[in-house]
Image: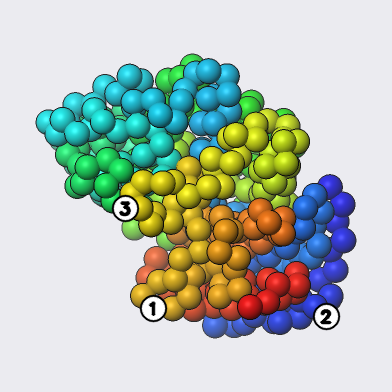
């Protein structure tokens, strides 16, 4: 990987200025921004107290990594996108439709499962009743998964799309069952290590990783945990599950996420190190059902919201793929031009209700797309 990075590049001045504007307006206290083309980084910069090697809680940007891990296991014959989830995990739901959920439905948020539930609160109640610690334990993890597997569906599988953390919780557990290892170990063995993503993983401040602590960007105060979140996952459900889950929990850097994007682009050319071309194509192609679904097997696509343009920006190519993270992180990849844009921030440090990034982020992305030579 070649780095042509020049933070002062005049072509990216608007993007750099907007990134600094986010600090002044308290959209976040730390941010890192990277643009790449093909195999090389074209430009990168930071704002606030972030550094190029700062570790951010990437929240739901974990999901594309989980999807990639799923497809690697598919390549080994352990799983299949069309496979029924119930062959791996036993649903306890009274809703018979859960037996129709296939892995492609979990990957593309078309399973019919609810979007989100505060499962950590139910675990806290169980703790009070049992008088024993469950939060962050393997028993707590199992209890939360059991709860998800007992839920009724809100719609028939493949009949509608509804972004669902719960679906990726199930996907992560199925990957563990098929891979015979915990999700963090599988991610390290099958994706992180082969791609050289040395600064990516779950639980960055575990005892064996104390050197990472000064580099971790904090995400603010947790009322539930009654402490600042620095080096532990921001998502309360993921924290209750021990910090390792399919929907959230990974920490990474802009440079490491670029390595992941580069692998996907290489795989689309048939040159991937860990991903086959068919796997990358599935991850980069919108699912056919239900009609009009903007999701792929692991990513979103640029979709305008009711309040304005896509968070990827008005200039984002229509066939780009990407993902947002609740903490203020995003990853966008355009397969046609092989442009990658990665923005990592800690917008939740000012409180989960801080929405200033939603207005700023499309402008930042458009400035980067322009800097990379794209226009309407």
Sequence-first disc among 1 and 2: 2
Q: Tell me if residue 157 comes above or below residue 301 in the rendering.
A: above
The structure residue drawn at horizontal position 76% and vertical position 80%, both measured from the top left corner, is 13
Q: Nearer the viewer, residue 201 or 177?
A: 177
- Name the outermost residue toward the left: 94
Q: Position of residue 352 (x, y in %)?
A: 39, 66
State the residue position of label 3. 162
Q: Earlier in the sequence, mark 3 or mark 1?
A: 3
Q: Which residue is mark 2?
A: 10
What is the secondary structure assignment of the residue under circle 3?
loop
Q: CA distance from mark 2 to mark 3?
A: 41 Å
Q: Position of residue 100 (x, y in %)?
A: 26, 31
Closer to us: 127 or 81: 81
Q: Which residue is mark 1?
A: 307
Quadrant in which the C terminus appears:
bottom right
In the rendered image, the vertical position of residue 140 relative to residue 219, given as above or below: above
Q: Earlier in the sequence, mark 2 or mark 3?
A: 2
351 is higher (above) or lower (below) than 193? below
Q: Position of residue 324 (x, y in %)?
A: 50, 58
Q: Secondary structure at mark 2?
A: helix
Please name which of the two marks, 2 or 3, marks the residue nearer to the observer.
Answer: 3
Q: Residue at x 68, y 56 (%)?
A: 336
Instruction: Judge the density around disc 1: few (<14), some (14-19), many (≥20) Cα neighbours within 10 Å.
Output: few
């Amino acid at each position: 990987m070649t780095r042509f990075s020049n933070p002062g590049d005049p072509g990216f001045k608007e993007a750099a200025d907007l990134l600094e504007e986010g600090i002044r307006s308290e959209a976040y206290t730390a941010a890192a921004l990277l643009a790449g083309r093909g195999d090389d980084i074209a430009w990168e910069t930071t704002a606030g107290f972030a550094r190029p090697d700062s570790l951010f809680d990437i929240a739901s940007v974990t999901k594309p990594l989980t999807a990639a891990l799923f497809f690697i296991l598919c390549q080994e014959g352990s799983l299949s996108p069309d496979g029924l989830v119930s062959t791996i995990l036993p649903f306890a739901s009274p809703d018979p439709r859960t037996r129709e959920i296939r892995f492609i439905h979990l990957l593309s948020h078309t399973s019919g499962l609810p979007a989100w539930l505060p499962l950590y609160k139910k675990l806290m109640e169980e703790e009070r009743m049992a008088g024993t610690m469950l939060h962050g334990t393997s028993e707590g993890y199992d209890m939360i998964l059991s709860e998800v597997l007992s839920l009724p569906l809100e719609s028939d599988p493949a009949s509608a799309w509804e972004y669902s953390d719960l679906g990726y919780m199930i996907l992560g557990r199925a990957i563990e069952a098929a891979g015979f290892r915990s999700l963090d170990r599988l991610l390290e063995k099958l994706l992180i290590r082969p791609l050289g993503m040395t600064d990516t993983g779950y639980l960055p401040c575990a005892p064996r990783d104390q050197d990472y602590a000064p580099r971790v960007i904090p995400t603010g105060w947790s009322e539930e945990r009654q402490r600042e979140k620095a080096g532990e996952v921001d998502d309360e459900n993921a924290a209750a599950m021990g910090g390792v889950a399919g929907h959230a929990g990974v920490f990474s850097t802009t440079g490491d996420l670029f390595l992941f994007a580069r692998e996907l682009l290489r795989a689309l050319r048939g040159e991937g190190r860990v991903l086959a071309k068919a796997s990358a194509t599935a991850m980069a192609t919108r699912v056919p059902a239900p009609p009009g679904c903007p999701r792929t097997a692991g990513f979103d696509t640029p979709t305008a919201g009711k309040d304005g343009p896509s968070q990827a920006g008005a200039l984002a190519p229509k066939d780009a793929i990407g993902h947002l993270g609740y903490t203020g992180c995003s990853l966008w990849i355009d397969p046609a031009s092989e442009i990658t844009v990665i923005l990592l921030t800690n917008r939740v440090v000012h409180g989960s209700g801080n929405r200033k990034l939603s207005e700023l982020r499309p402008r930042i992305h458009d400035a980067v797309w322009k800097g990379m030579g794209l226009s309407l």
